Amino acid sequence: MIGGGLRGTLVITQMRDAADNRRFPRHVRPGKIRMHWKDAQGHSHQANAKCLDISRTGVRVSLEKPVEPMTLVNLQSPDFRIAGVALVRHCTRKGLGFEAGLQFAGGLEWFRAPEGE
């Protein structure tokens, strides 16, 4: 090639959809999260949820019963070293159960533990 120039340059642009346009990355982490909440009628509910992924500001869980969006839930998880409240952003049926997106509230945040802990 004469002149040391490049022969065709490939430019790749990465498309990001709205779901991936987040301030903090999601981490797939196995773990259990205990949830407590009251429904619109004031009835208490509880569920053992399974973490699907977690970020600094929220968590996506799998659970056996639905939770209404905009419900405040109390969370506790020794697996993730968190205890506090979260707001249900969405809850949809997935197979025999439900999948919910929870946004941490009241100053609750999750920080990834250093490797080896």
Image (cartoon, rainbow, N blue to C red):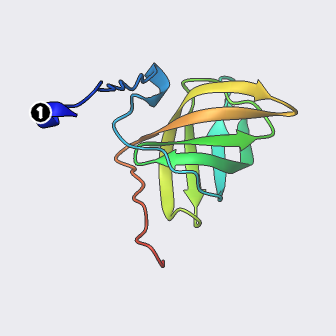
Look at the picture and state if 40 lies above or below 49. above
Which residue is painted at 39% across and 51% down in the image? Answer: 109
Disc 1 crowd rating (10 Å Cα; few below 14, some 14-19, many 20+) is: few
Of 113 and 48, nearer the camera is 113
Given the current orientation, which residue lies at the most extreme left position? Answer: 3
Given the current orientation, which residue lies at the most extreme front position? Answer: 2
Q: Quadrant of residue 39?
A: top right
Which residue is painted at 35% across and 24% down in the image? Answer: 13
Left or right: residue 97 versus residue 88 is: right
Look at the picture and state if 115 lies above or below 76. below
Left or right: residue 71 versus residue 92 is: left
Give residue 22's position: percent from left, percent from top: 38, 33
Exactly how many numbered labels are in the figure? 1
What residue would you read off at disc 1?
3
Of 30 and 90, nearer the camera is 30
Q: Which kind of residue does numbered mark 1 sit on?
A: Gly
Image quadrant containing the N terminus? top left
Give residue 94's position: percent from left, percent from top: 78, 29
Which residue is painted at 70% across and 33% down in the image? Answer: 99
Q: Quadrant of residue 9?
A: top left
Label 1 SS: helix
Of 103 and 10, nearer the camera is 10
Given the current orientation, which residue lies at the most extreme bottom position? Answer: 116
Give residue 44's position: percent from left, percent from top: 71, 39
Give residue 35's position: percent from left, percent from top: 65, 48
Which residue is painted at 48% across and 51% down in the image? Answer: 84
Left or right: residue 88 versus residue 2 is: right
Of 73 and 4, nearer the camera is 4
